[in-house]
Structure formats: C-alpha cells, structure tokens
Image (cartoon, helix red, strand yellow):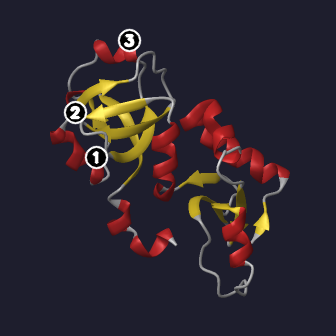
C-alpha cells in the first residue's frame, strides 16, 4: 500500500466532495484517531494509521484490503466511488433523498428513481449533484446523481427520472467478486 499522489488525492477528494461537500475534511481530521487514504491494486482504502501499521506486517502480494474501500481508479485513471463507501457517504452527505417503500426494490435492482418513488428530498438540491438514497426508515440504500433540481421535480410527471442510479446495496450480491 502506498500513499496517494497529488493527482490521485485531488481526484478522490473532488469525487467525494460531489457527495459530501466540505465534510471531506471531517474524514481526514477526526478527533478519535488519524485516518489516511492509501492505494493498493488501483483501489483506494480509508483506514486508521494504527490499522495501517498492523497491515505493514503482511506481504504486499498477500494483502487483500486494509480498511474500507472508498473506490477505485479505472484504466483511464478516473476515480469511481464504490458501494463500500456508502457508510461514510450516508454519514456526511450534503443532500439526501428518501425513497418510498415501493421504490426501494426497484432501486436496489439497479434502476433509476422516478418521481412517484420519491418520498422526501433535501431542500434546495441542485441538478447534477450527488445524493445518498435512504429508505423512509433512514437506512442507506445507495447513491446517485440528481437529474433535476427540486423546482423542476415539483412540475415533473410521475414517470420522470429524478435520480440517476450510481450504486446500490444490491451490488454486494450482483457483483460479489468485483468488490474486493
């Protein structure tokens, strides 16, 4: 595992900022312990320094992961957030969307959210911004990107797409081998 380069750090923080805004600094500057981002086999991991020291005892070829996988770099060197980062995205999200019970299943199967599945949304949510999708019981389901602003959503028809699907908890089952 190695520290991220300046370009990699910028790409990771820019992508995280789309979902959690200025709360990115709360990931790094935590009161309990120092946390860091590390790269291992094109995947970015978020872990404490104490865990990182323990992982240093494991040979690099045999190490599968260390901490929480936040995302991965594609072959074109673009950063993509994975579903394993949902815990931190949900905790620090700037904009949230609550989905009706009937829309939960369709979203978890990998479909976009339409207006009739929308229960609530954070006020003043702009177009093309990252949102975390939650059930009405505040259980994180995944994350996506808004297709319309809140003002446009009010006048949209019930079958209009409101949130584009990015990742959902169903990926733990659908792409089990690709997560690690």
Q: Nearer the viewer, residue 159 or 2?
A: 2
Helix, strand or loop status at disc 2: helix
Q: Nearer the viewer, residue 87 or 158?
A: 87
Marker disc for residue 35: none
Q: Position of residue 111 (x, y in %)?
A: 30, 47
Q: Nearer the viewer, residue 162 or 81?
A: 81
Q: Are marks 1 and 2 in contact (CB under 8 Å)?
A: yes
Image quadrant in which you'd find residue 160: top left
Q: What is the spatial separation of the Cα atoms under label 1 and label 3, in whole angstroms?
A: 23 Å
Number of residues whose C-alpha sits closer than 10 Å to that of mark 2, classed few (under 14), some (14–19) or many (20 or more): many
Residue at 40% of width from left, 72% of height from top? 176
Count of marks placed on residues = 3
Helix, strand or loop status at disc 3: helix
Q: What is the spatial separation of the Cα atoms under label 2 and label 3, in whole angstroms?
A: 17 Å
Residue with the most extreme right position = 6
The quarter in which the N terminus is drawn is bottom right
In the picture of the structure, the residue carrying the numbered disc 3 is 151
Residue at 45% of width from left, 21% of height from top? 125
Number of residues whose C-alpha sits closer than 10 Å to that of mark 1, classed few (under 14), some (14–19) or many (20 or more): many
In the picture of the structure, the residue carrying the numbered disc 1 is 107
Residue at 29% of width from left, 14% of height from top? 154
Q: What is the spatial separation of the Cα atoms under label 1 and label 2, in whole angstroms?
A: 9 Å
Give the mark nearer the N terminus: 1 vs 2: 1
Q: Position of residue 124 (x, y in %)?
A: 45, 15
The answer to whether residue 160 is above or below residue 107 is above
């Amino acid at each position: 595992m190695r520290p991220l380069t300046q370009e990699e750090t910028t790409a990771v923080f820019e992508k995280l900022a789309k979902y959690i805004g200025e709360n990115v600094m709360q990931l790094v500057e935590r009161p309990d312990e120092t946390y860091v981002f590390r790269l291992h086999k094109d995947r970015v991991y978020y872990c404490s320094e104490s865990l990182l020291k323990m992982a240093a005892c494991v040979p690099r070829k045999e190490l599968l992961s260390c901490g929480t996988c936040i995302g991965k770099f594609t072959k074109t060197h673009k950063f993509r957030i994975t579903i394993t980062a949902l815990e931190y995205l949900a905790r620090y999200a700037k904009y949230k969307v609550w989905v009706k019970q009937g829309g939960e299943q369709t979203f978890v199967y990998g479909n976009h959210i339409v207006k009739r599945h929308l229960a609530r949304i954070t006020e003043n949510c702009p177009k093309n911004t990252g949102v975390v999708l939650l059930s009405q019981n505040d259980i994180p389901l995944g994350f996506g990107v808004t297709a319309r602003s809140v003002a446009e959503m009010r006048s949209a028809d019930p079958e209009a797409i409101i949130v584009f699907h990015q990742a959902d908890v169903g990926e733990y089952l659908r792409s089990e081998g690709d997560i690690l």
